[in-house]
């Protein structure tokens, strides 16, 4: 399987001078990696999950330029467009790129979550984002957690 170090380097260069976004994607990556391993996903799913976790918010920068905001739907729209050539330049396989781009293009869409990689990505992103959410908003999104590991982290970190 491909080593993510080159991708991390490219993403840090892409997000240069924006430490909060760099920190965010690295935290989401850490949670996604841990949840995937604890849930014992197969190696290909784990690889796609980890890659999508690193890249899930790659559309924020372009969304801010094009739309003046980083709303979830704008991130989804722009992120997949930006991710594809990055992944191609690093030698990722086309079928993997297709799934990674799908996950990026849907990581703020919470109805009809299809696949364990998608489920874990949503959970990992929320584990990081919960720290900046109001209690009422947190309650709304707790129901999205489905994996045993994700629920354990949620309960342990946030007492939810």
Image (cartoon, grey):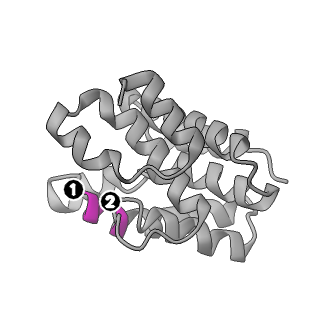
Secondary structure that dominates the magenta span? helix
Q: Within 10 Å of the Cα at label 2, are there few (<14), some (14-19), or many (20+) other Cα atoms?
A: many
Give the image location of residue 72, x and y in percent. Answer: 27, 58
Disc 2 to disc 1, C-alpha distance: 6 Å
Instruction: Residue at 69%, 69% (x, y): give it.
Output: 96
Instruction: Residue at 49%, 52% (x, y): give it.
Output: 146
- 157 left or right, relative to 34: left
Quarter of the figure that contains the N terminus: bottom right
Is disc 2 placed on a helix, strand or loop? Answer: helix
Over which residues does the magenta segment extend?
A: 72-77
**Where is mark 1, residue-wise?**
71
The residue nearer to you, when weighing 29 against 55, is 29
Seen as rendered, the residue at the extreme right is 1
Note whether 91 is above or below 20 in the view shown: below
- 152 left or right, relative to 37: left
Give the image location of residue 119, x and y in percent. Answer: 51, 58
Q: Are marks 2 and 1 in contact (CB under 8 Å)?
A: yes
- 118 left or right, relative to 97: left
Instruction: Residue at 61%, 75% (x, y): give it.
Output: 98
The residue nearer to you, when weighing 89 against 84, is 84
- Locate residue 17: give its quadrant: top left
Give the image location of residue 154, x and y in percent. Answer: 44, 33
Q: Is residue 117 magenta-colored?
A: no
**Where is mark 2, residue-wise?**
75
Q: Which mark is residue 104?
A: none
Instruction: Residue at 31%, 57% (x, y): give it.
Output: 62
- Locate residue 92: give its quadrant: bottom right
């Amino acid at each position: 399987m491909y080593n993510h170090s080159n991708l991390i380097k490219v993403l840090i260069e892409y997000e240069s001078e924006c430490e909060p976004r760099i920190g965010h994607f690295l935290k989401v990556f850490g949670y996604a990696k841990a949840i995937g391993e604890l849930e014992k996903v197969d190696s290909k799913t784990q690889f796609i999950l980890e890659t999508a976790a690193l890249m899930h918010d790659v559309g924020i920068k372009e969304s801010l330029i094009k739309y003046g905001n980083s709303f979830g739907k704008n991130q989804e729209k722009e992120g997949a467009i930006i991710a594809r050539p990055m992944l191609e330049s690093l030698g990722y396989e086309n079928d993997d790129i297709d799934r990674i781009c799908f996950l990026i293009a849907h990581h703020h869409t919470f109805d009809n979550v299809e696949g364990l990689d998608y489920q874990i990505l949503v959970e990992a992103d929320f584990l990081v984002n919960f720290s900046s959410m109001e209690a009422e908003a947190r309650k709304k999104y707790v129901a999205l957690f489905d994996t045993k590991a994700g629920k354990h982290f949620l309960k342990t970190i946030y007492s939810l």
